[in-house]
Image (tube, rainbow, N blue to C red):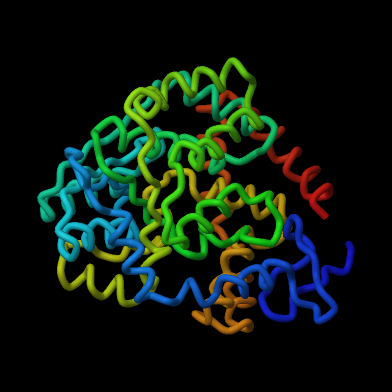
Amino acid sequence: MKNNFTCTRCINDRTVKNISFDNHGVCNFCRAYEQIENELHDYKTLEKNFLNRIKNNGHKYDAAVGFSGGKDSTFVLYELVKKYKLKVKAFTLDNGFMSEEAKRKIKSIIKELKVEHEFVSLDEQLVKNMYHEICKKYLSPCLVCSFIGYAIMINYASKVDAAVMIHGRSPYQMLRNYSNLDNDYFKPFITEGLSMQSGNPEELLGIIISKVNDFVSKELADSIKKMFLTDCYKNGFRPFVAYFLYHPYDKDKMIEELTKKTSWVLESEEEHFDCQIHHGALNLKNLIARRSHLMPEISVMIREKKITRDEGLQMAAESVIINKDMAEEELKTFCQFADLSYKVMLFKARVYSLRWW
């Protein structure tokens, strides 16, 4: 095993793709963050930017919002309705692995906030084909869910005639791959989002859409675009707004406010409680990386001064402790759905872990 040099500021080490270190032992992700750190915390300017982006010029809804029932999307929905008084159309993607617990929580919050909402279901065979083709090579169910989720979000705002699409990804998720390189296809969204001048939605969102061609066959890519993106090409693309790019992200305050003002409660599984295969997918990613898959996100938390470096190391160590029996059962369930071999998946994961290092 190679000596995995670790950044002297965060906990990223050489197992993180595209990482490099300067003469002070600081990684390129930390250096890139330094360049936008002041902008990320100038909340007075960010609030003006956000208000400018959510102006409605005659659309049926002020915003469309993806809603999973977790703390982040629930807080975003609550703030948009109660603080900003927006007319919102919420939607939830049901990819076939949504827990009943999540569905109950979603229905309860939607009723309380009196928001229009729908569960979006997809063509099962097309979804199976996506899972099969992408996971056969890349071994990542989460990658497929991301593509489906973003495609649905991009299209949904146009479908229901919402002025913007607002999502609740945390800063740690948005900035986990942010560097001085151009290989992070979310970087243009961060750059454009921090600018006071809105960019071209079709051009920006086209970056994500074009990535589909890198992961699946042309035939499947064409089917995905035809199935998921018809409305945005017909009615025009709508701006993609990251709520937590413009607002402070304080997990404890968010939970406190939601539990006081709504029926929302914190589950034993704080993250991704809505997904029935989350443990299996995360365990697979940890196996490939041979460390916590969440390392880059934890590193952002350190840069944001939410936790210390020592706390980050402890968090990374704890995040790889997963119920192995549960993870195995979930991954087998997924493999059966996607017509994949469980044993082959694990074998490839072990091979990929050697290539990674």
Residue 113 spot, x, y in % from top left: 13, 55
On the image, which quarter does residue 116 sit in? top left
- Does residue 244 lie above or below 192 as drawn? below
- 15 or 232, nearer to the observer: 232
Which residue extends farthest top? 219
Residue 101 spot, x, y in % from top left: 28, 49
Residue 237 spot, x, y in % from top left: 38, 35
- 110 or 1, nearer to the observer: 110
Residue 214 spot, x, y in % from top left: 66, 31
Residue at x 58%, y 45% (from the top left corner): 328
Q: Is residue 30 left or right of 109 when viewed as pictured? A: right
Which residue extends farthest right? 2
Which quadrant of the figure contains the C terminus?
Answer: bottom right
Residue at x 15%, y 63% (from the top left corner): 82
On the image, which quarter does residue 93 sit in? top left
Q: Is residue 5 left or right of 174 when viewed as pictured? A: right
Q: Is residue 234 left or right of 321 when viewed as pictured? A: left
On the image, which quarter does residue 135 sit in? top right
Residue at x 37%, y 29% (from the top left corner): 232
Residue at x 24%, y 35% (from the top left corner): 161
Number of dots carrying numbers? 0
